[in-house]
Image: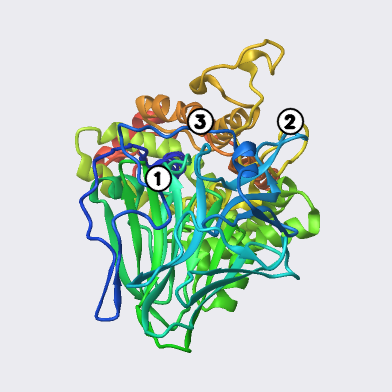
């Protein structure tokens, strides 16, 4: 095994880890019939239709209306925080109008903020709702108009929504919000009637249609939650379409819907046992995450009070970690870090720290490469020394291959003997590459799952490190007015990755087999095409790492020029000492007669 082969195989394996199959199929099936709402033994049995959502049918398609018009038609309470803007619909007590003011749809200067929630009847309808289910009691419904204690919900001014059913029961929802993305809902029912009533609070998040972001094995998008202390990434939209619902009994935790960068999650009180899960309603193509508390009987003159939380915003790591400490549940599991979370989180933390110092994510990535190279410098030096020895041994290896080309076991035996005598290790060059693979994969995951990388520029034409390099010679770097197809959209950074890999190959010992040499010679250009659709930040990391590797190797050759020199091929060795060796030696020296003793 040669150093060149080890290098290419290791890189190819790392790329195979990155690719994966994308689970983007959309399958729709009618849902199974569910029982109606009722209370049994103090526990609420979930209903067939989502609470407060009107029933539709496949024969009656939804009418998509203008959002501004829909917002004007209902009484509302404004939401204003440093991170959010929107409104609460007093008809139905829904948070159904919400944009993220610190994140924009595109990198354009006039881009609108990212919209998370939108009212029912508009495009991509998505909302959160707090309510009650009950037995033998009139509870608020989807068309109930609530009274509000104020006109604006801000971090310093909570708002209480209230409604009286006219039969002695008063329902209240006290809503508060912090500076980021966390709503707190305190649901209170007061029974002033003459008879006890059975009620149960619930919370739900409902969206029309699945997330537009793709779900893959490297990044979960769809229904997600923490059930009984463990993160659950096994639920997805096609499964819900097929099964109709998935239910869980859990104490604490949370459930919701995760997009690539955004999250809407319901977080019940962590000390209460609840019924939670996901549903799909095929007649209106609606997905729902909901949490229902246990039913309770409220006696006359008494009340019931339940506190829950709603996260609606961007999956910013530090914010999620803060909520994890405050709420007592791992909300940061909304980010699907994967199996190597223990390694990726420190890499991400170091990258954020570098960004805080430098102020530019591109240069922070380059600084990360430099730090990694410095840490691996001693190992890399041993790698290059091993490569130099392998280069010097190439003529001897070729001679052995020629002599024992028909005897593979003998060839392996002789090559191992040669490595022992020369103190060369053909696998030594793999170690730095193997150490680089988890770092490379960690950065890849960070770039695709961390919203902190979204829309972060570097320099010149790189305006978004989480997107592919947009500048390509195929259209003369934008001078030709056309956009090449995706398979031809090869940017400058992936080209630089291919060129630096090719140059690294030239510095390494050549492969003795000409067929293998041609195949592996194509690898830099194949990987250049494969890497083109990946994030520019990942390509920047790889290209910088290649350039530093080349510089380090050239410096080693400068200090040890004998490692660069290719020695002349030695005389083909004999398989065993004896008269034949003396005879060959005599023939080589002109057939001189041996001296008389």
State the separation of the CA atoms marked 1 and 3: 26 Å
Q: Quadrant of residue 214?
A: top left
Would residue 130 be found to the left or right of residue 456 on screen?
Answer: left
Frontmost residue, 345 versus 320:
320
Residue 330 relative to residue 83: left or right: left
Q: Earlier in the sequence, mark 1 or mark 2?
A: 1
Mark whose residue sits in front, 1 or 3: 1
State the residue lying farthest toward the top: 480
Query: According to the image, label 3 marks what residue?
Result: 524
Q: Residues within 10 Å of mark 2 (few under 14, many from 20)?
A: few
x and y, in percent, of residue 123 in the image: 52, 36
Distance, label 1 to label 2, CA atoms, is 29 Å
- Asked which secondary structure carries label 2, the reply is loop
Residue that carries the numbered disc 2 in the rendered image? 461
Q: Residue at x 69, y 59 (%)?
A: 352
Q: Is residue 82 left or right of residue 412?
A: right
Left or right for 174, reference 456: left
């Amino acid at each position: 095994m040669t150093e060149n082969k080890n290098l290419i195989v290791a890189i190819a394996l790392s790329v195979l880890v990155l690719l994966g199959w994308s689970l983007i199929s959309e399958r729709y099936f009618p849902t199974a019939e569910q029982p109606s709402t009722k209370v049994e033994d103090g526990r609420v049995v979930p209903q067939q239709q989502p609470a407060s959502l009107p029933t539709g049918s496949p024969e009656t398609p939804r009418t998509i209306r203008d959002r501004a018009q829909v917002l004007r038609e209902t009484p509302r309470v404004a939401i204003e925080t440093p991170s959010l803007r929107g409104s609460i619909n007093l008809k139905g007590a829904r948070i159904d109008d919400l944009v993220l003011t610190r994140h924009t749809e595109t990198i354009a200067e006039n881009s609108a903020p990212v919209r998370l929630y939108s009212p029912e009847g508009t495009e991509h309808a998505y909302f959160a709702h707090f309510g009650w289910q009950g037995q033998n009691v009139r509870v608020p419904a989807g068309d109930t108009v609530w009274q509000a204690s104020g006109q604006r919900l801000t971090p310093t001014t909570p708002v209480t929504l209230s409604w009286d059913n006219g039969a002695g029961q008063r329902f209240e929802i006290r809503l508060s919000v912090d500076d980021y993305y966390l709503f707190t809902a305190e649901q209170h029912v007061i029974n002033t009637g003459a008879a006890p009533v059975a009620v149960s609070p619930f919370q739900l998040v409902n969206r029309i249609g699945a997330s537009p972001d793709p779900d893959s094995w490297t990044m979960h998008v769809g229904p997600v939650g923490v059930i009984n202390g463990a993160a659950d990434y096994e639920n997805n939209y096609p499964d819900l379409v097929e099964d109709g619902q998935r239910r869980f009994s859990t104490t604490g935790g949370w459930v919701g819907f995760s997009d690539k960068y955004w999250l809407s999650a319901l977080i019940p009180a962590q000390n209460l046992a609840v019924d939670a899960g996901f549903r799909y309603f095929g007649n209106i193509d609606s997905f729902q995450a909901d949490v229902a508390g246990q039913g309770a009987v409220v006696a006359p003159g008494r009340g019931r009070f339940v506190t829950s939380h709603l996260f609606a915003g961007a999956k910013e790591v530090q914010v999620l970690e803060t909520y994890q400490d405050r709420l007592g549940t791992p909300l940061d599991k909304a980010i699907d870090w994967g199996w190597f979370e223990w390694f990726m989180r420190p890499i991400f933390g170091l990258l954020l720290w570098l960004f805080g110092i430098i102020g530019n994510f591109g240069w922070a990535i380059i600084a990360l490469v430099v730090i990694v190279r410095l840490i691996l410098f001693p190992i890399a030096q041993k790698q290059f020394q091993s490569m130099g020895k392998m280069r010097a041994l190439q003529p001897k290896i070729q001679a052995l291959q020629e002599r024992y080309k028909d005897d593979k076991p003998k060839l392996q035996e002789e090559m191992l003997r040669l490595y022992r005598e020369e103190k060369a290790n053909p696998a030594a060059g793999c170690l730095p590459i193997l150490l680089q693979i988890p770092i490379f994969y960690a950065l890849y995951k960070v770039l695709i799952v961390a919203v902190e990388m979204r829309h972060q520029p570097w320099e010149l034409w790189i305006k978004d490190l989480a997107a592919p390099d947009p500048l390509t010679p195929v259209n003369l770097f934008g001078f030709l007015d056309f956009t090449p197809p995706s398979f031809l959209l090869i940017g400058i950074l992936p080209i630089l990755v291919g060129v630096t890999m090719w140059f690294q190959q030239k510095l390494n010992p050549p492969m003795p087999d000409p067929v293998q040499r041609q195949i592996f010679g194509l690898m830099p250009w194949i990987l250049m095409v494969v890497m083109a659709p990946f994030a520019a930040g990942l390509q920047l990391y790889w290209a910088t790492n290649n350039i530093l590797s080349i510089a380090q190797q050239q410096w080693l050759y400068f200090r040890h020029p004998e490692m660069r020199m290719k020695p002349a091929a030695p005389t083909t060795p004999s398989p065993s000492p004896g008269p034949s060796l003396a005879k060959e030696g005599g023939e080589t020296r002109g057939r001189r007669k041996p001296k008389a003793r």
